Image (spheres, coloured by chain):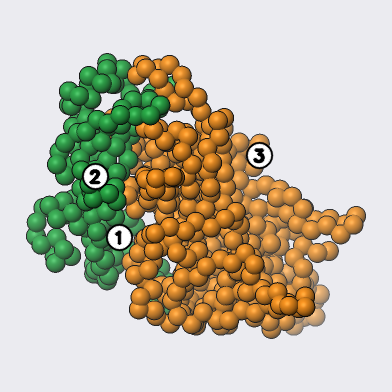
Chain colours: A green, B orange
Amino acid sequence: MREVLGGQPHRLVAIDFVADKGPSSEVVRSAEVFLYRPDRDVGVRALVHLQEAAVVAVAPVSGTQVPLTQEDYQLAHELALGSPEVQSRLGPGLREAVIEVLRELPNDAEDPCFRHRCVFLLFRLPEGYAVVPRVVVDLTERAVRVQGVKP
Amino acid sequence: MRAGLPLLVALLAGVAVPVLEAQPPPPPQDCSAPFFVFQEFPTSGAKQTAWAVCWQARRKNGLIIMSAHFRRSAGAPWVRVLWEGRIAEFFVPYHPAGSPRFRDVAWYNWPLVPLHAGDCPPALGGTLLSDPFRVPEPVSLPGIPAWPAGPEVCKIVHDRGLAWKDDTKIKRGEELVLWSAYDAANYNYLIEWTFRDDGAITGRIAATGVNLGSGFYETAHLHSPLWRLDIDLDGFPRDSVHEGIHKELPGNVSDDFAPVIAAEKGLAWDPLAFTTLHIHDANLKNGKGEASAYHFMPLRYGTSRHDELFTKSDFWVTRYSGIETVGEDLPKYVAPAQPVADADVVVWYTGSMHHLVRREDGEFVSCALGTCWSGEAHTMWVGFMLKPHNLFDRTPFFP
């Protein structure tokens, strides 16, 4: 864990309580702890046996496999709503929309989001999903790009 | 001891004592209510088979089966079938340009959708189950997929149609179903686990909801759920997996064989071979002394192959490790390959739904942002069956 996190600031992604196996088929009450280090875009999962308070297994995780964190969702939301281009191209109806966030992981090295932590947004209204320009938020660069959309 | 004394006195005095019926052994209980579900079959009349199941509902993996034990007759010992069953990935690649390619488990921590009576009508055998320890997450946190208060699971006990029919003789079957709805933004996945009266387990996933917007309203795509099944027949380890193969040979001669899988690996499903996995326990036998097994049988329409290495096989067999739960890492888990014969094994399986978007799936309507895409893609299912083989001593539910 220390090797991956290096004592640097990290985020708690999730803690899940799981049932690992004991030597006599008994349940070993355990937790899977998932941490993320944003500056290097790496994560780590650890299996902890709770009664022994011992880390029994560790798995490094690449940034692409680290789920969106609470901080990612909040940052995407703030950047998009604060973008003058998003405000002008979507209009006042934006305030009525629920924003849903999906990851963008392009394979194309020319894409500005290549190897960045990026998301794109869906805008949901009571009638359905808005047909609006595609809003991509680059969380690594803290940038918003608004792209055309085919209806 | 106190209860036994009057019986001993009566026997010594030559008093006739009514024959005591064998009491069914109590169900193994790896969890407490409401996570513990105990169901005997048939639901009316003398009880024969039974399931004892534990569930857990959580973000990311949705509805997880934490243990499942089966009782094959009223007085028979309980047999563990599953240590755990979960969804390890939903892989969703879009056509034709190959993007986006969602991993709905690895990339997110999606919640479940709270269920209500309409999802789980009592008149149809439904009971809503709630996790009393879950702290509801408010909708007000900006951008974060919310998991409001409400039941996570629907339990249904109902008729499953004909178990068998022989001219005028029939037997109707019953089953216990546990299901939840997984909230992956515009899509919902229905995660369903069924425990039948005849000892079979089915796992199914349905994709439904609104087709992806942002330019993909009418774009065909695949939904490929990947299950991780920790099958521990009669406990662990001492389990082995055999590859069930059917082969048609020239001259209308055919053969069926099932070599043991010696080391961790991925396997392809071959429709011409009716590929199945046969999971055996070294000690588990039926009353005739025959080795019992569960056969893993795909319920599928096609095969999804992509550049991603974890999609190169439909089945994977690995040795149990509590930290090995990530579907995309399967190629790493089997290299180097560890022995899996007479071991604690985990079976992984990918099924695929090919969604050719229909015009009926949606239409453009007016809304506050100008135009919205409105409509629903109806449910489409894929799954598997775990079917007992030589577990019973005779045809279950045969008069």
Task: Report the chain holding disc 2.
Answer: A
Q: Position of residue B115 (x, y in %)?
A: 49, 37
Q: Do the numbered discs 2 and 3 sit on residues whose CB atoms are within 8 Å?
A: no
In this rendered view, identify the residue nearer to me: B166 or B207. Answer: B207
Secondary structure of the residue carrying numbered label 2 = loop
Residue type, label 3? Leu
Work out whether residue B288 or residue B222 is closer to the camera in this orientation and state it: B222
Residue B124 is marked as 3
Residue kind at label 1, given as amino acid type: Glu
Q: Chain of mark 1?
A: A
* Horizontal and vertical percent position of residue B262: 48, 82
Q: Are marks 2 and 1 in contact (CB under 8 Å)?
A: no
Q: Amino acid at mark 2?
A: Asp
Query: Do the residues under discs 1 and 3 have CB atoms within 8 angstroms?
Result: no
Q: Chain of mark 3?
A: B
Q: Which residue is mark 2?
A: A111
Q: Residue at x 55, y 81 (%)?
A: B260
Query: Which residue is found at the position 50% from the left and 24% from the top?
Result: B363
Query: What is the spatial separation of the Cα atoms under label 1 and label 3, in whole angstroms?
Result: 37 Å
Residue, disc 1: A32
Quadrant where the C terminus of chain B lies?
Answer: bottom right
Which is nearer the eye, B60 or A114?
A114
Estimate how packed mark 1 is, as few (under 14), some (14 to 19) or many (20 or more) residues with alpha carbons within 10 Å.
many
